[in-house]
Image (tube, helix red, strand yellow):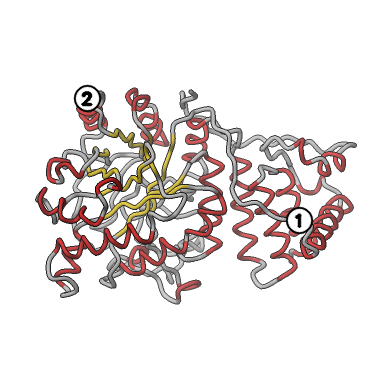
Amino acid sequence: MRYCKKLVFGLLVFFVFFQSCEKDKINNESSDDGVFSVAVDSIVSDSLLLSVLEEEDAFRKMTKEGRVVDISGMDVVKENPKKVYAHYMPWFQSVEYDGYWGQHWTMANKNPDILDADGKREIASYYYPIIGPYSSNDPDLQEYHFLMMKLSGIDGVIFDWYGSKDVHDYDLIKQSTESFMERLDDLGMEFSIMYEDRAAEEVYNEGLATSIVEAATMDFQYIKDTYFNKLNFLEHNNEELMFLFGPSSITSTADWDSIFSVFPVNEKPHFLTLWASQNMVGNSASGEFLWVAEDHLTAHEYYYDEYIGNNLITVGSSYPGFNSFYEEGGWGLQHDWSITHDNGNVFVETLNYTHHEAADFIQLVTWNDYGEGTVLEPTEEYGFLNLQLIQEYTGVNYVAEDLQVVLDLYRARKEYKGNQNVEYYLNRCYRKIKKSKMRRARLILMAIERFYGS
């Protein structure tokens, strides 16, 4: 296994590879090694970039004639066989895509329509996404996030999920979660659901169920009917695996037995609760997972000492830090502690924690919880650093320059929206990334910028 031994800082180094045989190289895509190595686009001739677009146009013709068929999925080779999943918040809305700014960008007192001197929007977070605030429903965003994950060696996502009923923003979160399914399928990524049982209490309070238990039972029936039939729903030892962030509202083992009655006896999923909570769920629980805690690595030590060797499912937890914005955002003081990010060192030490070797898999906490400051996706503050550390941990052959290609693809999607010709080339760029043809993907982007840019 490969593990992060130290942080690597400094400028990314680019290597020039276009010499006399440059055109032979782009035509022979089997030479791609997953590493982008173009230094400055001015070293690439117009004739070469034109030939790239001509070849893609020829491919378009063959596709229309039915001679080419795309096969979904993206195979990523990892030296570290341990599965890694990113905890994902599908709860963001933007003016550009949804017509309004959602509460997770605004909280109670922030207005993303206000720009600072650098053009950054005012959002409810100490951290700023490198692409700016976005909508979870945006297909461009979904492509960007999942490609970033794949190039980092992340195997899938665990969606934060609040139930199936239209209460507060719960239905929006459900719809956003389901909008990701096509992209998940296309990239061959797994997914699971982390249920919040306090949502069942809210459903009951709104009069949409006769009890909290009935509300949760309806949600579990929905999960069973809607998600368990997906071929890429996360499994452990051939059984579906789902999570509970709690329990907090339902704390009786008898109640959980009732809720789990929606599953046939021989089809009950693995069910993991928040650590130190399994006893409230009883026999329906298969184990617990660790989360960010005030005592940081002491919690890790307790968790692993408690669970290693007890035949329960063990989930490693890695995070970059914790810095809640809730009080400053007007949502009240919910955490009076923080864990400094320490320029990536906190993420390194949680990735490298000794007992991770015995964990069944790793949960990254989180991909994009801006409110609590546990963000791993690229931000203005940390760039690609967190994803580079994941790449080192998982042992993929991709590097930061490859992540830049995905970022450039996202930005081109926005810049050339509505230009059907360019959008075709961008779709081809996506397909090239799926096949790890990173050099070719970059050349397509360079050609678009050269001949279609303003």
From the viewer's perspective, is the residue at label 1 or at label 2 nearer?
1
Q: Residue at x 43, y 71 (%)?
A: 113
Residue 62 x/y as whole percent: 81, 59
Give the amino acid type for the residue marked by disc 1 in the picture.
Answer: Val
Residue 25 x/y as whole percent: 83, 39
Q: Residue at x 56, y 34 (%)?
A: 10
Q: Residue at x 19, y 53 (%)?
A: 334
Residue 424 x/y as whole percent: 72, 63
Q: Is residue 323 above or below residue 134?
A: above
What is the crowding at mark 2: few (fewer than 14 residues within 10 Å), some, or many (at least 20)?
few
Secondary structure of residue under mark 2 = helix
Quadrant housing the C terminus: bottom right
Residue at image mark 2? 305
Secondary structure of residue under mark 1 = loop
The front one of 286 and 365 is 286
Q: Residue at x 75, y 59 (%)?
A: 448
The front one of 416 and 63 is 63
Lower sequence index among marks 1 and 2? 1
Q: Is residue 66 above or below residue 395?
A: below
From the viewer's perspective, tell me whether residue 29 is left or right of residue 20.
left
The front one of 188 and 444 is 188
The front one of 270 and 96 is 270
The CA distance from mark 1 to mark 2 is 54 Å
Residue at image mark 1? 68
Identify the image quadrant of residue 186.
bottom right
Disc number for residue 251: none
Q: Are marks 1 and 2 in contact (CB under 8 Å)?
A: no
Residue 310 x/y as whole percent: 22, 26
From the viewer's perspective, tell me whether residue 22 is left or right of residue 337.
right
